[in-house]
Amino acid sequence: MPEIPDTLFEKLNDMFGKRMKIDEDFLEKYSHDETAELKGNIPGVVLFPMTAEEISEVLKLANHYKVPVTPRGAGTGLSGGAIPEPGGIVLSLEKMNKMVEFDESNLMITVEPGMITSEIQKIAERYGLLYAGDPCSSESSTIGGNIAENAGGNKVLKYGPTGSHVYGLEVVLPTGEITNFGGKMVKNVTGLDMVHLLVGSEGTLGIVTKITLRLLPKPKFSVALLAPFESVETAIGVVPKLIKDSGIMPSSLEFMDNSSIKLACEFLNVNFPYSEAGAHLILEVEGNDRDAVADEYEKLGDICLKEGALEVFVADNRNTREKLWKVRKSVAEALMVYSPVHCMEDVSVPTASIPELLKGSSEIAAAHNLETIAFGHAGDGNVHITFIKGKSSEEHWKTHLKQALRELYELAKELGGCISGEHGIGIKRKKYLPIALDEAQIRLIKGIKRVFDPNNILNPGKIVDV
Amino acid sequence: MPEIPDTLFEKLNDMFGKRMKIDEDFLEKYSHDETAELKGNIPGVVLFPMTAEEISEVLKLANHYKVPVTPRGAGTGLSGGAIPEPGGIVLSLEKMNKMVEFDESNLMITVEPGMITSEIQKIAERYGLLYAGDPCSSESSTIGGNIAENAGGNKVLKYGPTGSHVYGLEVVLPTGEITNFGGKMVKNVTGLDMVHLLVGSEGTLGIVTKITLRLLPKPKFSVALLAPFESVETAIGVVPKLIKDSGIMPSSLEFMDNSSIKLACEFLNVNFPYSEAGAHLILEVEGNDRDAVADEYEKLGDICLKEGALEVFVADNRNTREKLWKVRKSVAEALMVYSPVHCMEDVSVPTASIPELLKGSSEIAAAHNLETIAFGHAGDGNVHITFIKGKSSEEHWKTHLKQALRELYELAKELGGCISGEHGIGIKRKKYLPIALDEAQIRLIKGIKRVFDPNNILNPGKIVDV
């Protein structure tokens, strides 16, 4: 375990005072993220910087002393991206959580990385605008973390993932310089697209200290549909048809299998219509014209019914819509309570291959005698296939999970997909990366990492080892 | 001038036969692009590969012999990105112009890089779908070139630039490997975002040989509005208000000053309403519901009238709409005829700063006694300020253009913008890059270039010198 040298420790202590923590409770809390199956590493110190300049100083020191630094948002990550090196420095961005500017004329908001994502959604709403990033963790995750993982969520189908909304980034480079990539320009080909290289780089290429996001006019009307189906197969079979046959791009198209619904309802202590159905789809459409929105949801509802939906429920007021979404957004938390030992995946495949993915993953789970549930973002091909330890022995779980994961990733790759759609590689999927990427691609990733971070001090050991 | 060694020449000749050209006419034609003020360089050979494998072979040979290779689409670029090194190899992708796959279930199309962009638009349309990339050069530029420059165009406001539609790329790396970045997944955080690093990299990081683009449901109704204004100031002053006050995101929001309109009308030999007006805005709105679209264009029209439009014309059928767009899309060509010596810029600023940009650029032109016109994509902050030699002397033009450009770029930077929104840096703006980017950013660009292309054989001397 690399110790923090005394001289460095003293310098950090002078700089941060009470904003430097070394008590055991703190170190334990900051040793892990929410990846169920990953143990953490106890860091040497946790720092709470307030400015880009402080972060720059820390990174310069880290280069000098060759001590690893791991940035961290809310710690809600699901691939171990915020797990520090043992004895290293954790830089928690939690105190950098303010709005820097709301620029109504340009429809842009600039915030610090520690702001909770739902805060941004709420601020935008107050101005009649929409921040279209909407990960399920929006009430707890930070925008900085969303950027690190290019978080997806429930509106990617229509609006794209987090990165689609990011136009400008203030970044402290691993070498200590503070720089600004992009800005409030909608178009920019001045040099390489560093903004989108940083997005999804899991805190390995720089620490984002200010973020400029584009907001959109908020559609006046939103209607959600809930469509129960007899089986997973019939529900998932509808997905590719919905957009193609309707000519409509829903803002959401989500999927929950029967076990997911039961878990969430039990956790929330609520009832859900057709809770015995094999699977449910949730769709959402939006627009500025009430009649046009009604036409659209009727068209989508008709396709569902024609393709085997048992019923289509319309949630056209905020209250019902929020109840519906609460169930969907609680599945991950419910799972945590039901079986803390589980492995939630987020493979992503071409939408039309979702039925094959679901079929294949059930077979993998069955072959390894593992409990499984599936839910997620069916409309964009990103489904949370989850393996659950349940009552199986520790040994069975460990041996079979490893093999089941490999088979799942290989299946996703065969279907033209990838091994992570929105949670990232982090530590969790690092050894499986060669399933998804070839040698040349991994060589390029390592090369880029070295260009940004020659001493490999910033969040080392994530995505790849260099 | 680096000569192509005889042994390399023979190998290329064996491989390409009649698809290798060395006659003077060819070499001259492939020596330049459409950047009005840049002289070209005569290459040693022009090759017309048909496959990624052939390109891979050429790049391996180029590395061995240390001979520069410049990829080329239709040669319609506006920053010198396709100008070869003197005596080097030009790889023209013109013969790789086929559709590889139309995947209706996934709403994705895969094409070769040499396909003309408007072909893709037409294929999509045949299926009731939309390819939302729409550069003004769509009838002549290739999708490969659009990707190299992250071409913008007329629908960026709503749909984003070319890169927003690119999901998968087959790429031949400068070191010769053929690899696939991304694919048909809508979400992907498996490693770094190489797709969007390649987009806009001006053919310096790899040669794109297959492109997978996402298509969207095509809105059923499109209506264009033409709004003449007394002056540039009143027209441009409306722009930031249009989206903010209406809550509507038009698909286009274009601008032409009086000189632009006159040039285009003369070139096309057509009349334009209010052709004496100081400036015109063109707006376009789309949707699936005729009444909803009508409500939207009325709202936008009302805002224009309230803010000083002399009139608002509605083009609600394809014929009128196309006539309108023809004028807008012909400005660049008309300019070429009016004054072959000119310098078309594409600085990009936050939308709300457009009035200041226009005011400042007029002042710069006046101070340097240069003729100027302005037109372009007002809605996204990207305006084609153009300096024209007109009747000024060669010497006056050269001296003052250089200084005027520097002042324009500095103005764009001051306003929070960048020096190129959609045409790229290429050779043309290379020496001005330090106005837009700081030392650390330029160091990173050079570093990334070296990671991809250790021998600097692929399109050297573009964006930066390494």
Image (cartoon, coloured by chain):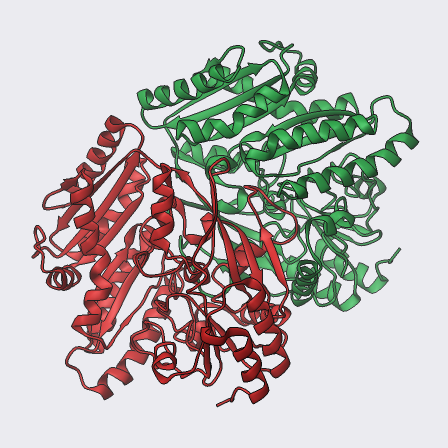
Chain colours: A red, B green
Residue B127's image quarter? Answer: top left
Q: Is residue B344 above or below residue B73?
A: above
- Quadrant that contains the C terminus of chain B: bottom right
Q: Is residue B446 above or below residue A321?
A: below
Answer whether residue A45 is visible to the viewer in this image: yes
Q: Which residue is found at the position 20% from the left and 68% from the top?
A: A335
Q: Which residue is found at the position 19% from the left and 74% from the top?
A: A339
Is residue A223 toward the left or the right of residue B354 in the image?
Answer: left
- Quadrant that contains the N terminus of chain B: bottom right
In the image, residue B410 lies at what x, y percent?
A: 72, 42
Q: Is residue B102 above or below residue B123?
A: below
Q: Which residue is found at the position 23% from the left and 51% from the top?
A: A237
Q: Which residue is found at the position 22% from the left and 65% from the top?
A: A333
In the image, residue A126 lies at what x, y percent?
A: 34, 40
Answer whether residue B19 is visible to the viewer in this image: no
Q: Nearer the viewer, residue A3 or B239?
A: A3
In the image, residue B397 lies at what x, y percent?
A: 86, 31
Q: Is residue A19 above or below residue A234?
A: below
Numbered marks: total: 0
Q: Nearer the viewer, residue A42 or A401?
A: A42
In the image, residue B275 lies at what x, y percent?
A: 63, 10
Q: Nearer the viewer, residue B330 or B278?
A: B278
